[in-house]
Amino acid sequence: MFEEGRGVAQSYEEAARWYSKAADKGHFPAQCNLGVMFEGGYGVKQNDTEAAQWYRKAANQGDAYAQSSLGGFFSARPRRGTEQCRGSSMVKKGV
């Protein structure tokens, strides 16, 4: 609603606040949306670590979009050790 300005003034900051409340309660679509917001810096300070954390939480609940996003997130950013492996396995799960 706030992210797109449906019926209210558009505000990424307000969207992030509401997504955060729902994400903290385990709502996986909100977790995935919060990952997108942290990755792109929409309404929050851009933070790859936070983005990956929220993508992972949603992906672990079976959200295919989050799995794909997490896989793409890591394959686009070379990492050392297990992070790269986790990204690769998420790409396989999401496809």
Image: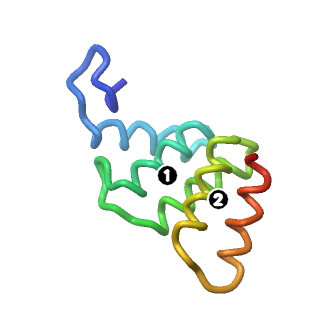
Q: Nearer the viewer, residue 92 or 15?
A: 92
Residue plotted at (58% across, 36% down):
29
Across and down, in percent, residue 74 comes to 59, 67
Q: Is residue 49 left or right of residue 28?
A: left
Residue plotted at (24% across, 35% down):
11
Across and down, in percent, residue 81 comes to 68, 85
SS state under label 2: helix
Q: Quadrant of residue 17?
A: top left
Work out whether 47 lies above or below 84: above
Residue holding disc 1: 35
Reading the chain from its start, which is encountered first: label 1 or label 2? 1
Residue plotted at (56% across, 77% down):
78
Work out whether 85 lies above or below 38: below
SS state under label 1: helix
Q: How many marks?
A: 2
Q: Is residue 56 left or right of residue 73?
A: right
Crowdedness near tag 2: few (<14), some (14–19) or many (≥20) residues, C-alpha within 10 Å: many
Q: Quadrant of residue 5?
A: top left
- Inter-mark Cα distance, 1 to 2: 13 Å
Crowdedness near tag 1: few (<14), some (14–19) or many (≥20) residues, C-alpha within 10 Å: many
Q: Amino acid at mark 1?
A: Gly
Work out whether 28 lies above or below 48: above
Across and down, in percent, residue 59 comes to 69, 50
Q: Is residue 12 left or right of residue 48?
A: left
The reply to whether callout 1 and callout 2 are in contact (CB within 8 Å) is no
Q: Amino acid at mark 2?
A: Gly
Across and down, in percent, residue 46 comes to 34, 62
Work out whether 70 lies above or below 8: below
Disc sitting over residue 71 in the figure:
2
Q: Nearer the viewer, mark 1 or mark 2?
A: 2
Q: Residue furthest top?
A: 7
